């Protein structure tokens, strides 16, 4: 299975919170884990914000950052190109998504197009983004209605 993680799911691999166990189980099942290049900056910003807000101790911040940096080269990070951004703009309008959410959805759409067959999963803790991803998955199924 090819798994796409948006930043909300990716963060749960490094910061224990509701849903962390679910995301870790999905990653264990995946043959390939994909995300968007923007997830790097989004995660680092979210991690730093939690540390500065006092939600993470300095030692936990450093541990999470080191683990993320070690894992990042093993993810397939979808390049954010001009064409992908244009597709994201259309998806933002179609599904009423925020900017970076639409970039994640366009990245997932690229992953789906690259798979000739096989299972793909999308993981996010943002319900509007999940609904949009489910719509893309339904559209991919043969014999869909």
Image (cartoon, helix red, strand yellow):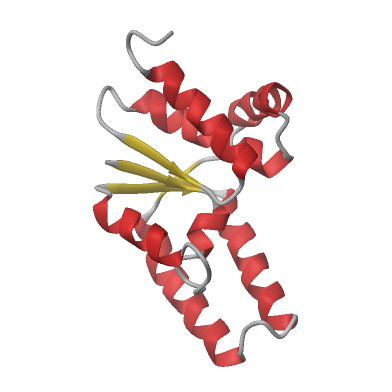
Question: So how many labels did they put on this image?
Answer: 0
Quarter where residue 86 is shown: top right
- Residue shown at 25%/52% (left/top)? 29
- Residue shown at 52%/32% (left/top)? 133
> Which quadrant, please, contains the C terminus?
top left
Instruction: Between residue 116 and residue 37, name the one nearer to us.
Output: 116
Question: Is residue 44 positioned above or below 63 on the image?
Answer: above
Residue 129 % position (x, y): 60, 39
Quarter where residue 121 is shown: top left
Residue 115 % position (x, y): 31, 27
Question: Is residue 138 positioned above or below 17 on the image?
Answer: above
- Residue shown at 57%/82% (left/top)? 61
Q: Is residue 87 left or right of residue 49?
A: left
Instruction: Between residue 62 and residue 3, name the one nearer to us.
Output: 3
Residue 39 % position (x, y): 56, 54
- Residue shown at 67%/43% (left/top)? 100
Residue 13 % position (x, y): 44, 66
Question: Is residue 79 positioned above or below 145 on the image?
Answer: below
Q: Is residue 109 left or right of residue 57?
A: left
> Which quadrant, please, contains the N terminus?
top left
């Amino acid at each position: 299975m090819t798994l796409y993680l948006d930043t909300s799911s990716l963060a749960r691999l490094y910061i224990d919170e509701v849903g962390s166990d679910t995301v870790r189980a999905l990653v264990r099942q995946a043959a390939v884990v994909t995300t968007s290049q923007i997830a790097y900056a989004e995660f680092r910003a979210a991690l730093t914000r939690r540390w500065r807000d006092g939600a993470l101790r300095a030692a936990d911040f450093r541990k999470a950052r080191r683990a993320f940096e070690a894992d990042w080269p093993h993810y397939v990070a979808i390049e954010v190109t001009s064409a992908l951004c244009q597709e994201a703009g259309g998806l933002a309008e179609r599904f009423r998504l925020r900017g970076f959410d639409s970039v994640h959805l366009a990245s997932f759409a690229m992953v789906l197009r690259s798979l000739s067959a096989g299972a793909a999963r999308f993981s996010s803790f943002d319900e509007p983004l999940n609904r949009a991803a489910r719509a893309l998955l339904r559209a991919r199924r043969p014999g869909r209605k």
